Image (tube, rainbow, N blue to C red):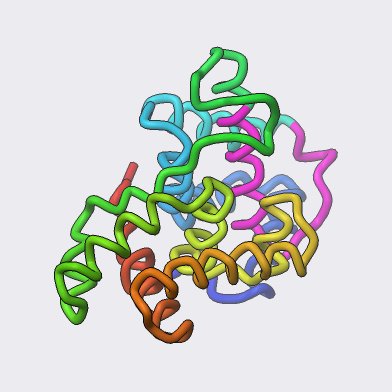
Amino acid sequence: MSIIENKSDERLLWSRFLNGDDQVLSLIYLQYSNSLFDYGCRFTVDKHLVKDCIQEVFCTLIRTRKNLSSTDNIRLYLLQSLKRRILRDLKSAGSKSMLINDQEYSFDLLLTENLDDHLRELDEEKRELLAGAMLSLTDRQKEAIYLRFNKGLEYEEISFLLNLNYQSARALIHRAIEKLRDVIHLQEKKVSQILFAILFNDSKAVL
């Protein structure tokens, strides 16, 4: 059962944390740690690095508590903090997955996990085409559709994480869906349903 049910709960818990209640941070960790770990594992196969980065995110929250502002979207704040931490560590380590800046990085949809189970209604040829098309998406498109269909984020939240404006975030996801639709010749709504079925059930990484 979810500990945090709505924005009011998030605002209240965050306020309690800012006012010195460390037990609240434990609740927040329990609520979001597995989701953070799954997200982090999309940037690197180094699970130890991801775990270390998650721990550092929460340690930093305690160290900088007095300088933090209020929020009613703890998950978004944590996702952004973890992403920045992982990309920073990958870049400092000279990882080949990092290119020039924080706008260029690898993102893995991890589609090998039970993909066929979610595509039973498609024939074998279309399943292969769809899997290939999803892997051919740009890393930014992969991250965007992951955030939309796995994490259920709104376009405003996705634009925040990807450092895009609202329209650019919508366009990024629309182009990705269009590319997949063109490959398997299904209506856009049907492609969205398939993406949701695949990605929403594809969070296998657990701390």
Q: Position of residue 155 (x, y in %)?
A: 67, 69
Q: Residue at x 51, y 32 (%)?
A: 55
Q: Position of residue 166 (x, y in %)?
A: 77, 67
Magenta span has 80? yes
Q: Quadrant of residue 108?
A: top left
In this rendered view, identify the residue nearer to me: 190 or 124: 124
Q: Position of residue 50 (x, y in %)?
A: 45, 32
- In the displayed structure, 100 sits above or below 57; it is above
Q: Residue at x 58, y 39 (%)?
A: 82
In this rendered view, identify the residue nearer to me: 162 or 34: 162
- In the displayed structure, 194 sits above or below 84; it is below
Magenta span has 204? no
Describe residue 134's horizontal placement relative to residue 11 as left or right.
left
Number of on-image labels:
0
Image quadrant in which the N terminus is located: bottom left
In this rendered view, identify the residue nearer to me: 66 or 191: 191
Main secondary structure found in the magenta portion: helix
Q: Is residue 79 visible?
A: yes
Q: Is residue 1 visible?
A: no
Describe residue 140's horizontal placement relative to residue 201 as left or right.
right
Q: Residue at x 63, y 71 (%)?
A: 154
Q: Residue at x 80, y 61 (%)?
A: 165
The span shown in magenta is 64-87
In this rendered view, identify the residue nearer to me: 150 or 110: 110
Describe residue 36's horizontal placement relative to residue 166 as left or right.
left
Image quadrant in which the C terminus is located: top left
